[in-house]
Image: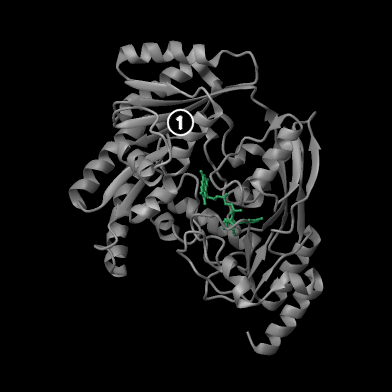
Amino acid sequence: VSASDRNSFLSRLAEIVGARNVVVNAADMEPFLVDWRKRYRGKALAIVQPATTQEVASVVRACHAAEVSVVPQGGNTGMCGGAIPNDAIPSIVLSLSRMKRIRDVDPLNDTITVDAGCLLAQIQQVAAGVDRLFPMSLGSEGSCQIGGNVATNAGGTAVLRYGTMRDLVLGIEAVLPSGEIWNGLTRLRKDNTGYDLRHLLVGSEGTLGVITGVVLKLFPRPKSSLTSLIAVPSIEAALALLTKLRADCGERITMFEVMSLNEFDLVLAGQPDLPRPLGGDSPWYVFLELTDPLATANLNEALETSLAAAFEDGIVTDAVTATSLTQAENIWRIRHGVTEANMRAGISVSHDTAVPVSSVPDFVNRVDDEISRRFPDVSVYYVGHLGDGNIHVVAIFPRDDYADPDHFAATLAEVNAVVDEIATSLGGSISAEHGIGQSNRRRLAAFKEPLALDFMRSLKAMLDPTNIMNPGKVI
Ligand SMILES: Cc1cc2nc3c(=O)[nH]c(=O)nc-3n(C[C@H](O)[C@H](O)[C@H](O)COP(=O)(O)OP(=O)(O)OC[C@H]3O[C@@H](n4cnc5c(N)ncnc54)[C@H](O)[C@@H]3O)c2cc1C
């Protein structure tokens, strides 16, 4: 882009959103050009912060005219570098951070309609204010935006009970790559009027359009809840316990997370103020939450009865149920402390694999055998959403042994291939909830069915023939 073209392009953007909302100063742009894990760094002509859907549409049209690509960005908490521009292509980062309006709350219809830039935590609070629950819950909820959650089809800890983002979205408003505004903000639970563009945009990671507004489902707010940490002797026992609790407690299970002993120890070693909730060591731990909309539901009794039988069957060896909010919070702090603990321990790479729930033990045992045999200096830890079949295999490479980036990259590719091949052989997916972005493109190309990839490319070419919307991501 020549200097004069660049200046006239930036002036046009300033006319649309106001000069102070076109950030060009290097220091001010910096936080938008590095992902939170500091793996990707990009360049942009500007960070542009529109306040309305109309402004987003005008910005996209201006980018079209100037042949500049648009990289939508929410809270920049994504795991795969999807919100960071590619250096090769002149780009702007289109930040939704000024679009934070709650447009409508309808407790009778159990829906909330919001701007895409609303923080996830903000939506949870507004829902609670009308005695409703918006159930999506992520470690990043204080900084990720609902538009980013939709664009990545986020998962989190309550998927077992409420589903992924795809299950929580009723309607979407988006600016398409052409600059047209698609108003799909329906509040309907039933609408069979042809193909559903909403489901194309969910999980599209900014490659098919900019999501500007969303209609979300609300749920009854639980009035009783119970948190328990349960020691189990093996991953097989964890699965048996899940099956038993589902039969006994049904929909009351909102969270059922598992963690291997070495990951549990790693988290606690880094947080000495955190009490160890159970004495002794157990090969695996289950983090369980039960909830019920009835204030009088006796969750304790229901769980105690189930656990007593599970002890007898040998699938549970110890358990503690939180008797105070602080105790419950301390148990969940262990679960939420994983990412930081891993980053402290070495060069950590977390795989985001999904396999059928019934295949999780097979998956874990095969990955364990294969990696310890082929890469004895790489440590493997496990944490994940067992109820969704989504286990994060965390490979930690000792920093000293892998200081050479080429050595690290080559070994990582082999470790990835081991995990991906085992997952695929079990009918699994290489990305359960984090998406593809920049980091998983090659792996997607290697493991996705060719016909599905062709179909994705055709859709992209149809909606975005000049490839201005987040190029170099996903496909
Ligand atoms: C501590 C921590 C815990 C996490 N836990 C989980 C978890 O349990 N489950 C999970 O699924 N993820 C998790 N994440 C990852 C991340 O928070 C989610 O992917 C989240 O949905 C991203 O939202 P964001 O607003 O930060 O999006 P960004 O990172 O800004 O963007 C992500 C992608 O979406 C696109 N995008 C963003 N906004 C829009 C928009 N309005 N329109 C179109 N495209 C857009 C971007 O171009 C990019 O491709 C975690 C992250 C952290 C830091």
Query: Which residue extends farthest front?
Result: 273
Q: Position of residue 113 (x, y in %)?
A: 76, 43
Q: Neighbour class for label 1 at 10 Å: few (<14), some, many (≥20)? A: many
Q: Is residue 331 above or below residue 381?
A: above
Q: Position of residue 121 (x, y in %)?
A: 65, 44
Residue placed most toward the observer, 259 or 319? 319
**Secondary structure of the residue carrying numbered label 1:** helix
Q: Residue at x 56, y 68 (%)?
A: 33
Q: Residue at x 52, y 37 (%)?
A: 157
Instruction: Classify residue 237 as left or right of residue 122.
Output: left
Quarter-of-image position of residue 111: top right
Q: Can residue 196 be spotted in the picture?
A: no
Query: Mark 1 = which residue?
Result: 387
Quarter-of-image position of residue 166: top right
Residue placed most toward the observer, 348 or 106? 348
Residue placed most toward the observer, 423 or 333? 333
Residue placed most toward the observer, 60 or 16? 16
Q: Can residue 132 be spotted in the picture?
A: yes
